[in-house]
Image (cartoon, rainbow, N blue to C red):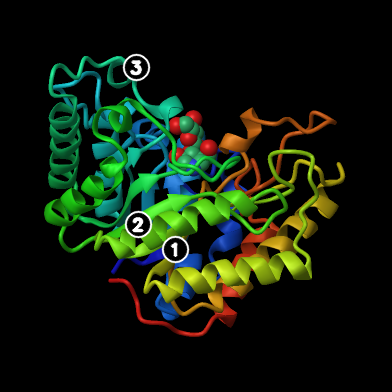
């Protein structure tokens, strides 16, 4: 068992010349980590991480970033490095280096790994070669061969993964229909069932997850309905699926809609979650962050509102004893996908993560700690 406080103290000492790093790291030493608080309740807590900080160790930003990761997380998930465009330069080769770096870092720090994702079944996120692949005269068997080989090889490379996002985001959020890709055109939507069956064979001990971003917010009705149809179909066909991954990119949304966490929508959301657990599925929060796009400029107000929404959401989700995992989609506002998308009208940097851009803990970090502390214990995944 790694002593996280000692680790933080070492990191803080190593970084004492770094203006970026010092404060946040010191600020955490007296408190139990989010991982410790979550573990007490049988919950895995961790974060997405790209390879960059692991590969850039020795630079101030990478070391400060990893100090927070090492102090707070009991699990990691590669932000991008296990996706097809990262692993597959072409139809025959695999490039594991960047994902390996993250997995090795996790192992050295006694952290579990989640796997994201065996198939992001969305044409936008396919590598070009796969979209343009010539599936030949027997397209269904060629597509199945490529898919099966990919899943077997990747699962064999990472046997330590405790939970795989087998399929990511294949339900069109606007229509609720299944997305078409080069693979589904070649072999039909059986691509989804096959992926789960092969994942079960190749990773027999891992939790197998369908992961998507449907939420309680206005405009998500078709998305929720489409995901539920998919899950019901999986169950009816005997497809080996264990959990629904609820990404949980919550907050003021990707449009100008308000947060909309009102009673009627909350009722609908609970109904959706109840249906999922009624299918004997576990639940996982796989990509938590709290978008502050439409909140006022004042950072203190923003941080307070982000924390309040985060707390309310986590409390609701943690009411479900089936929820066994909470993964943050990044720990620091310095490195979040949301900085590059849907800019705020005032152009200010966003503040969606538990640590700020200088790696100082924010009210959201406290809200997460309190939510874990308030949660009922549950049977751990592993
Ligand atoms: O955060 C990820 C970003 O760096 C990538 O550019 C993007 C495309 O690969 O994916 C982002 O992560 C997404 C995740 O893989 C699936 N759910 C939505 C996440 C945010 O877009």
Which one is earlier in the sequence, the residue at label 2 or at label 1? Answer: 2
- Considering only vertical position in the picture, is 136 above or below 188? above
The N terminus, quarter of image = bottom left
Q: Which residue is mark 3?
A: 128
Q: Nearer the viewer, residue 41 or 14?
A: 41
Which one is earlier in the sequence, the residue at label 3 or at label 1? Answer: 3
Q: Nearer the viewer, residue 35 or 352?
A: 352
Instruction: Report x, y in % for residue 57.
Output: 38, 35
Instruction: Report x, y in % for residue 233.
Output: 36, 58
Instruction: Report x, y in % for residue 70.
Output: 41, 54
Q: Secondary structure at mark 2?
A: strand
Which one is earlier in the sequence, the residue at label 3 or at label 2? Answer: 3
> Does the residue at mark 2 contact the one at mark 1 (Cβ under 8 Å)?
yes
Mark 2, mark 1: which one is toward the viewer? 2
Q: Secondary structure at mark 1?
A: strand
Q: Secondary structure at mark 3?
A: helix
Question: Residue at left 45%, top 84%?
Answer: 377
Q: Which residue is mark 2?
A: 209
């Amino acid at each position: 068992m790694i002593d996280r406080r000692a680790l933080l103290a070492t990191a803080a000492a190593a970084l004492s010349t770094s203006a970026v790093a010092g404060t946040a790291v010191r600020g955490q030493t007296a408190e139990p980590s989010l991982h410790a608080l979550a573990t007490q309740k049988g919950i895995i807590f961790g974060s997405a991480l790209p390879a960059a900080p692991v590969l850039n160790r020795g630079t101030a930003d990478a070391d400060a970033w990893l100090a927070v990761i090492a102090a707070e997380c009991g699990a990691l998930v590669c932000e991008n490095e296990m996706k097809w465009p990262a692993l597959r330069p072409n139809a025959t080769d695999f490039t594991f280096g960047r994902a390996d770096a993250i997995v090795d870092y996790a192992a050295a720090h006694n952290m579990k790994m989640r796997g994201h994702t065996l198939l992001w079944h969305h044409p936008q996120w396919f590598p070009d070669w796969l979209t343009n692949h010539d599936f030949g005269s027997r397209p269904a068997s060629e597509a199945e061969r490529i898919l099966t080989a990919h899943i077997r090889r990747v699962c064999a490379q990472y046997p330590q993964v405790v939970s795989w996002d087998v399929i990511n985001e294949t339900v069109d959020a606007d229509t609720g229909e299944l997305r078409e890709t080069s693979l589904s055109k070649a072999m039909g939507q059986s691509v989804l069932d096959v992926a789960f069956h092969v994942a079960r064979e190749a990773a027999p001990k891992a939790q197998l997850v369908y992961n998507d971003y449907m939420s309680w917010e206005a405009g998500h009705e078709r998305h929720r309905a489409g995901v539920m149809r998919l899950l019901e179909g999986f169950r009816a066909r005997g497809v080996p699926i264990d959990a629904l991954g609820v990404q949980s990119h919550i907050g003021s949304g990707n449009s100008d809609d308000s947060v909309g966490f009102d009673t009627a929508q909350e009722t609908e959301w609970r109904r959706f979650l109840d249906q999922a657990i009624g299918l004997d599925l576990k639940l996982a929060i796989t990509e938590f962050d709290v978008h502050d796009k439409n909140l006022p400029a004042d950072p203190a107000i923003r941080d307070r509102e982000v924390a309040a929404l985060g707390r309310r959401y986590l409390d609701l989700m943690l009411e479900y004893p089936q929820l066994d995992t909470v993964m943050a989609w990044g720990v620091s506002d310095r490195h979040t996908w949301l900085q590059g998308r849907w800019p705020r009208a005032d152009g200010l940097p966003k503040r969606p993560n538990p640590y700020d851009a200088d790696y100082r803990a924010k009210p959201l970090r406290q809200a997460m700690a309190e939510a874990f502390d308030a949660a009922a214990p549950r049977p751990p995944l592993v």
